[in-house]
Amino acid sequence: MPDARGPAPDPTRFILIGTSHAGNVGATARAMKVMGFSELVLVRPRFADVLIQEETVALSSGAADILVRARVVDTLAEALDGVTYSLATAMTPRDFGPPTVTPRSGLAALATHDPAHKVAFVFGSERYGMANEDVYRCNAVISIPTNPHYGSLNLGQAVQVLAYEWRQALGGFDVAARTPDAALADGQAVQGALTHLEQALVQLGFLDPAAPKKLMPRLNQLLNRAELRQEEIHILRGLAKAILDRTQPAP
C-alpha cells in the first residue's frame, strides 16, 4: 500500500555561491541526481538566468527537473534556512574557523551520530572559492584529499565526489548482480574442446605428438581458469575445425 504521506524529504541541500559558469550548474545537477539528491540553491550566480541557459541544461544531461526546482537567493543565510549542519568546501586552511573533516570519515560519523540533520554542502565560486565569513557560518570544513602537487578540482567534479561519499555514508545504493550470459560449460565439454584443439595443433605442426611436453596440460589449466560458457566452447571448436579444414592434406 503506498505511503499516503508521500516520499521522504531530501535530507541534503547543495549550495553554490557566486557560480560563474553555466556548465558547472548543469554538471552539479547531474552529479546530484545520479546520487539521489534533488535540492539545489544558488547564491548570487553570475547570470540571473543561469538555470535556463542552454549550456546548463545540456550539461545537466537529463537532470532538468533539479534545475526547475532550484532556487536563487541573495545571501548564504537565506540558502541555509532550515539547514541544521552545513559543510563548507574550502581548499585553503583557515587559522580560525570550524573544524576540518575528510569526506569518508567525516561524513560517515555525521550519518551515524546525527542522522536527523538537514545537511548542506556549500561550494564557493570557481575563481575565488569561499569567503572567510561564509566559511565561518558553517559547522565544518570538508576537504577532499588530493595530490599535494595538483589539487585543482572542477566544481562539478567536487560536487560529484562529495555527493557520492555522502550517499555511501547514508547507506548507498544496491548494485544489481550480473546475470551470467549462459551456463558454465561442464568438464566433458572442456575436454572435448581440448581434444579438438590438440588435433588441430598437431595437424598445424605446432604440437609434436612425439614430444608434447606440457603444452596440453597447460592449455587444460588455462581453459579451467577461464570458466568457459558453452558458447565459448563452440567458438574454440569452430576455431579447431577451421584449422583442420584449412590444413587438411590434399588427396
Image (cartoon, helix red, strand yellow):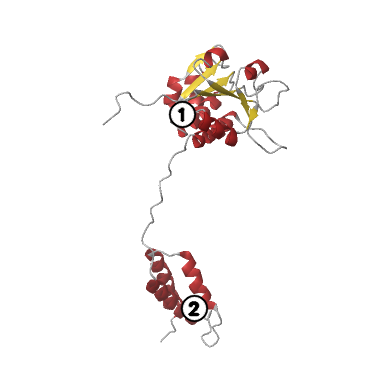
Q: In the rendered view, would you say 167 is above or below 175?
A: above
From the viewer's perspective, tell me whether residue 27 is left or right of residue 94: left
Identify the residue at the far front of this view. 113
Give the residue at mark 1. 37
Q: Residue at x 38, y 53 (%)?
A: 179
Nearest to the eye among marks 2 and 1: give it: 1
Type of amino acid at the residue the image marks with label 2: Leu
Image quarter of residue 1: top left
Give the class, few, some or many, for how many residues have Cα within 10 Å of label 1's Cα (few <14, many ≥20).
Answer: some
Q: Residue at x 43, y 78 (%)?
A: 195
Identify the residue at the far left of this view. 1
Q: Residue at x 43, y 81 (%)?
A: 248
Q: Nearer the viewer, residue 247 or 149?
A: 149
Q: Which mark is residue 161?
A: none
From the viewer's perspective, tell me whether residue 50 is left or right of residue 238: right
Q: In the rendered view, would you say 186 is above or below 140?
A: below
Q: Which mark is residue 201?
A: 2
Helix, strand or loop for disc 2: helix
Residue 126 position, x and y percent, is 63, 24
From the viewer's perspective, tell me whether residue 143 is left or right of residue 57: right
Q: In the rendered view, would you say 202 is above or below 17?
A: below
Q: Nearer the viewer, residue 26 or 4?
A: 4
Residue 199 position, x and y percent, is 45, 80
Type of amino acid at the residue the image marks with label 1: Phe
